[in-house]
Image (spheres, rainbow, N blue to C red):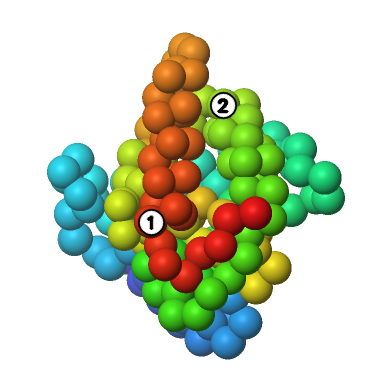
Amino acid sequence: MILIIEFLKYCILKYCIASLISIIYYKRFVKCIQYPLGKAYWGKNLSSHDAYKLEKSALVNLEKKYKCTCQKPLLHFPKIIKKFDCIHTLVITNNGISVNKLRKPIIINNHEKQLDCIIQNLKKVYLMHDDMHYSGKNITINKDGVISIIDFDISHFEDKLFDKKLNSLKQKIINILKNNKYIILN
């Protein structure tokens, strides 16, 4: 019995080391989201494991049902490239720079259509983002002016219609974009 436990510990350690090496490799090309062990998240007092599971669940559900309704298909949410469950880490696509970190002007075309697409996709999976910070840290813009929503570790799934909440979220995003001096809305 002790031999089996030691073997399992060895396998887990080996997997975690391989995971860390992969993350170091991936960090050059994409973003990694890591949830340090023992850290409490937001006012919900989520464990790092719970925050990781929530983020993963939200992104998996969005990816399964995602359909872009913009004129040309755009990516408005991160996609998971690789999951490292043992160390609570997701490797995701890089969807641009957070609005609060913009330092040069960027033009966003069809922002209303993009936001409608984002809201429709959130509605499909009954997902509400609960951390749309006024600084814009959870909204990214890429070099082509594509709006994306990130950071779903503080979110929740609704079990019924929640149009008013989503419309409020959309208005909040519009206000964040309008109040940023580097963003030009077309």
Q: Which is nearer the N-term, disc 1 or disc 2?
A: 2
Q: Residue at x 46, y 54 (%)?
A: 177
Name the quadrant containing residue 154. top left
Q: Which residue is mark 2?
A: 123
In terms of secondary structure, where does tag 1 sit? loop
Q: Nearer the viewer, residue 150 or 60?
A: 150
In terms of secondary structure, where does tag 2 sit? helix
Visible residue check, residue 75 = no
Instruction: Give the CA distance from mark 1 to mark 2.
Output: 26 Å
Q: Residue at x 18, y 54 (%)?
A: 40
Q: Position of residue 184 (x, y in %)?
A: 56, 62
| Quadrant of the snapshot with the C terminus | bottom right
The extreme right residue here reads 72
Amino acid on which the number 2 mark rests in the picture: Lys
Q: Nearer the viewer, residue 7 or 45?
A: 45
Tell me: residue 117, above or below residue 19. above
Tell me: residue 35, above or below residue 169. below
| Quadrant of the snapshot with the N terminus | bottom left
Q: Which residue is mark 1?
A: 179
Q: Position of residue 128 (x, y in %)?
A: 43, 33
Q: Residues within 10 Å of mark 1 (few under 14, many from 20)?
A: few
The extreme top residue here reads 160
Q: Position of residue 121 (x, y in %)?
A: 63, 34
